[in-house]
């Protein structure tokens, strides 16, 4: 089993427990459930924004603890203030140290928020809506094309946008009308190796009308220039900021160099 299989196996158990604990009905009664959502696809190309989707991530299976001290409210406020187009907040607890509370804290900011988790069930999409997310992630590597279509259609029915993540050519066939953005994960989830060329290789085969997002392993403003020239509109960056003692300062410094 690779790490993704391990995560998904556990996620299935978690979702079953959550469903038994909080009903869909209860989720729908959340105050945030009917808030007007924000468009990440639009924010990525906003002239006053950087295209960066800045991620809050405490730990990961590939890196272990990245930052145990940085506060989610402080970091996401700085990301917003210094020009992020959107926020990505890990809500997976076991493998990434995140939670719904982290996303709720990030919701204080008025920019689009991606719920970063492993979505396998419509229930998690309703949950994303209930905690104030604007966008969900669907990972092609663990979903069939039909599942992507169905989950994305459900997200759309709740006014959420969908970022579909692919990581090689074989997953291009998962791209469907229902997804709003296509992300290329440069991190191979089987080997944890990161290679920006994955993004550069795939962009020419992605639909031009859906904003492309390069994900993982981005650590320099030069790389953003290269990816932008290749056609990418979004840049999902976590570790490069989170590994610094103060991710807020790291983000502000990075943006100055763009
Ligand atoms: O920390 P990095 O290398 O900048 O990567 C951020 C983001 O792309 C990465 O966290 C990620 C991409 N796809 C995912 C799916 C699940 C969990 C995490 C991820």
Image: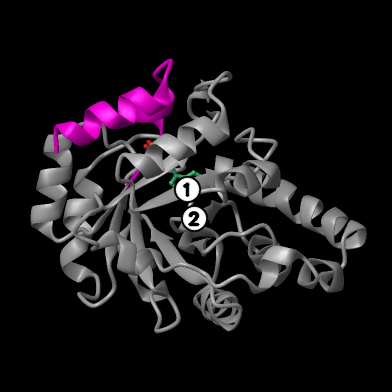
Cα separation between marks 2 and 1: 6 Å
Residue 22: quarter of image: bottom right
Query: Is any atom of residue 82 visible in this view?
Result: yes
Q: Earlier in the sequence, mark 2 or mark 1?
A: 1
Viewed as shown, does residue 102 lie left or right of 202?
right
Question: Mark number for residue 239?
Answer: none
The local secondary structure at tag 2 comes to strand
Seen from the viewer's position, the closer of residues 92 and 89 is 89
Image spot of residue 247 (x, y percent): 40, 25
Image spot of residue 193 (x, y percent): 35, 34
Seen from the viewer's position, the closer of residues 103 and 180 is 103
Q: Which residue is mark 1?
A: 88
- Was residue 245 drawn as part of the magenta stretch in this picture? yes
> Which quadrant does ligand 1 occupy?
top left
Q: Which residue is mark 2?
A: 113
Image spot of residue 234 (x, y percent): 28, 55
Residue 102: quarter of image: top right
Query: Is any atom of residue 187 visible in this view?
Result: no
- Residue at 57% x, 18% y is 69
State the predominant SS element of the stretch in magenta: helix
Viewed as shown, does residue 93 lie left or right of 244?
right
Location of residue 71 with respect to 129 vertically, above or below? above
Residues drawn in magenta: 236-258
Q: Is the CB–ligand 1 distance for label 1 below 8 Å?
A: yes
């Amino acid at each position: 089993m690779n790490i993704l299989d391990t995560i998904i196996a556990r996620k299935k158990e978690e979702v079953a427990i959550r469903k038994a604990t909080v009903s869909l009905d209860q989720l729908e009664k959340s105050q945030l459930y009917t808030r007007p959502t924000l468009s990440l696809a639009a924010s990525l190309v906003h002239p006053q924004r950087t295209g960066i989707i800045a991620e809050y991530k405490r730990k990961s299976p590939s890196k272990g603890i990245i930052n145990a001290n940085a506060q989610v409210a402080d970091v996401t406020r700085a990301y917003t203030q210094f020009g992020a187009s959107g926020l990505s907040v890990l809500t997976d607890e076991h493998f990434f140290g995140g939670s719904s509370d982290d996303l709720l804290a990030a919701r204080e900011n008025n920019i689009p928020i991606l719920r970063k988790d492993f979505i396998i069930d419509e229930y998690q999409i309703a949950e994303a809506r209930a905690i104030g997310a604007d966008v969900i992630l669907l990972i092609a590597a663990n979903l069939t094309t039909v599942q992507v279509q169905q989950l994305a259609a459900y997200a759309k029915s709740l006014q959420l946008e969908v970022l579909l993540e692919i990581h090689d050519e074989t997953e291009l066939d998962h791209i469907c009308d229902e997804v709003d953005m296509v992300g290329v994960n440069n991190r191979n989830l089987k080997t944890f190796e990161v290679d920006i060329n994955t993004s550069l290789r795939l962009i020419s085969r992605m639909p031009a009308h859906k904003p492309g997002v390069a994900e993982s392993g981005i650590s320099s403003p030069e790389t953003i220039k290269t990816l932008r020239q290749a056609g990418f509109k979004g840049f999902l960056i976590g570790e490069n900021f989170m590994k610094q003692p103060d991710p807020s300062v790291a983000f502000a410094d990075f943006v100055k160099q763009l």
